[in-house]
Image: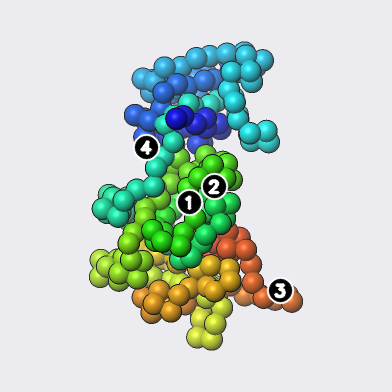
Amino acid sequence: MTETLVGWHAVNALIQRSPARVQQLYAMDSIAPGKREQLEQSGIKLQVLNKDAFLKQVRFDEGLAHQGVAALAEPAQVLPEGALVEHLQGAQPLVLALDGVTDPRNLGAILRTAEAAGVSVVIQPKDNSAALNGAARKTACGAAELVPLVQVTNLKRTLEKLRKDAYWVSGAAGEEGSVPMTQADLTGPRVIVMGSEGKGLRKSVREACDQLVAIPMLGAVSSLNVSVATGILLYEAIRQRG
């Protein structure tokens, strides 16, 4: 089974992170010489085509910005719990944990935002979680191939372990006692935990958080789609990190 990724950012990130998964690269003959040279130096088979041939050869969803480059690759898989440590990298790792997010399209949208926000790894429980299926991959627009998705047996236990490893855990919740996101500290090694739209975070997961963070709601609507809320909190973390 193979999938096609399009767009310079997605393809370049895939080459850098998982070159062994890439079977073939395609580029339009009109791309910038520097980008073409970079693709050639990757060591992966490259086929340069004119626009008509490129659009005929490369199959991708309409509406995606292909930017004249595509990669045919083995799809990424959900990673086992033991793979978590190797993806906790950087001076200030930003980790995203999902509790009870069961809609594949929400998962895909969250992965897309997580990749754009520089999230190191996304964690989800094995049970009561959305599958990384075709709907999720399509919504993710290539991000499912780039952001590591790790499944764990017990999310509370994983969060508690991360806390012992000097991570601070911030759970999204609108209940009493929550700190407005602009007043919450989202810097440093950080885990942001998002719950389901209907029930929010489970009690056991809330108890594993250092703080509960709320997104200010100024209108009549009392809640947001979980993928939208995730984007707001992740970019607030980016703002605070400068």
Q: Where is mark 4, residue-wise? A: 17
Q: Nearer the viewer, mark 3 or mark 2?
A: 2
Q: Say which mark, if any, is on residue 131.
A: 1
Residue 4 position in % (x across, y down): 52, 30
Q: Are marks 1 and 2 in contact (CB under 8 Å)?
A: yes
Q: Is residue 108 left or right of residue 218?
A: left
Q: Nearer the viewer, mark 4 or mark 2?
A: 2
| Label 3 – label 4 distance at C-alpha | 40 Å
Give the SS element for disc 2.
Answer: helix
Q: Where is mark 3, residue-wise? A: 221
| Label 4 – label 1 distance at C-alpha | 23 Å
Q: Nearer the viewer, residue 56 or 209?
A: 56
Q: Say which mark, if any, is on residue 136.
A: 2
Q: Nearer the viewer, mark 3 or mark 4?
A: 3
Q: Are marks 4 and 2 in contact (CB under 8 Å)?
A: no
Q: Nearer the viewer, mark 1 or mark 2?
A: 1
Give the SS element for disc 3.
Answer: loop
Residue 76 position in % (x across, y down): 41, 39
Total labels drawn: 4
Residue 116 position in % (x across, y down): 52, 48
Query: Quadrant location of the N terminus?
Result: top left
Query: Which is more N-terminal, label 2 or label 1?
Result: 1
Query: Which is more N-terminal, label 2 or label 3?
Result: 2
Amino acid type for the residue under numbered disc 2: Ala
User: What residue is rendered at 58% in x and 22% in y?
Assistant: 58
